[in-house]
Amino acid sequence: MPMLDIQDLTVSYGPLEAVRNISFSVEAGSIAALIGSNGAGKSTTLKSIIGLVPAARGRILLDDQDITRQGSATRVHAGIALSPEGRRLFGRMSVQENLMVGAHGVKSSQVIGRTLDEIYSLFPRVKERRRQLAGSLSGGEQQMVAIGRALMANPRLLMLDEPSLGIAPKIVAEIAGAIERINQDKQITIILVEQNARLALRLSNQAYALEHGEIIRSGKGAELLADPVIQKAYLGV
Ligand code: ATP
């Protein structure tokens, strides 16, 4: 049984079907990548998994439980977290205060303290800057805080929306390394949405290419990297 099973999911914004009848699954412990160009429906898929936009049709199963109609707070409690596109930090709050926002559903202060330590060991430069205003950080550092904030909820399934967007290549490599460690050391299942298809395919076990709200290709990351259609459309080959 996969951890997450999406069955014939359709998500509409008024007359627009941003996601149309997609099905895919994510195995526990894996990294799944969703690639595709602007407006393909990647963010909408993540938002619908965490309950920020309703499903018009289809089902979302987490550990075989139907969560399609659950509110997002319930889904976060069940172990799903989202680091949204554009980071959405509170610029006039400190880095640590931003991280604490992600922990608001966690009751045990012991657990919160331990998770904070783990995030600081994952991102030492976030630790160094923990008292600084989040708005004063570089884009890459803010991205690390956004990932950290999602981790503060102690998710089993972490969804990352465009973690490499607008970030210097050297920092992208740092963030990619952190994504691998979150997956391997913390055993957290990851869904990675990226326009940087090469990065996403390299990191992922299973990958899905979305176009106009539909899945047009799926396979192992390495398979899609070698696929001429994918190479032409997303890899600039
Ligand atoms: P991007 O990387 O640009 O975010 P994406 O693949 O994540 O692309 P979505 O953000 O899911 O794509 O958008 C899919 C489609 O839905 C687009 O046509 C977009 O304009 C539309 N859309 C997204 N959000 C809304 C909204 N709140 N209301 C109306 N249409 C929307």
Image (cartoon, rainbow, N blue to C red):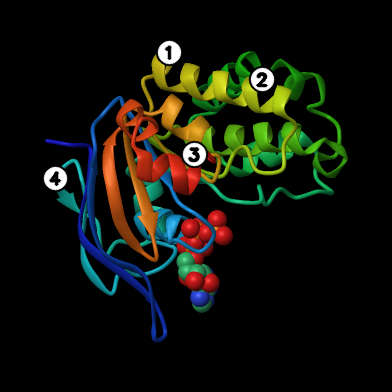
* Labelled disc at residue 123: 2
Give amino acid for label 1.
Asp
Dot 3 or dot 4: first in sequence order is 4
Give amino acid for label 4.
Asp
* Labelled disc at residue 185: 1
Distance of mark 4 from mark 1, alpha carbons? 25 Å
Distance of mark 3 from mark 1, alpha carbons? 24 Å
Front residue of 53/22: it is: 22
Q: Residues within 10 Å of mark 4 (few under 14, many from 20)?
A: few
Front residue of 218/41: it is: 218
| Residue for point 50% across, 55% down | 37
Give amino acid for label 3.
Ala
Numbered disc 1: secondary structure: helix
Residue 171 locus on image (x, y percent): 71, 25
Residue at which label 3 appears: 197
Q: Residues within 10 Å of mark 2 (few under 14, many from 20)?
A: some
Q: Are marks 2 and 1 in contact (CB under 8 Å)?
A: no
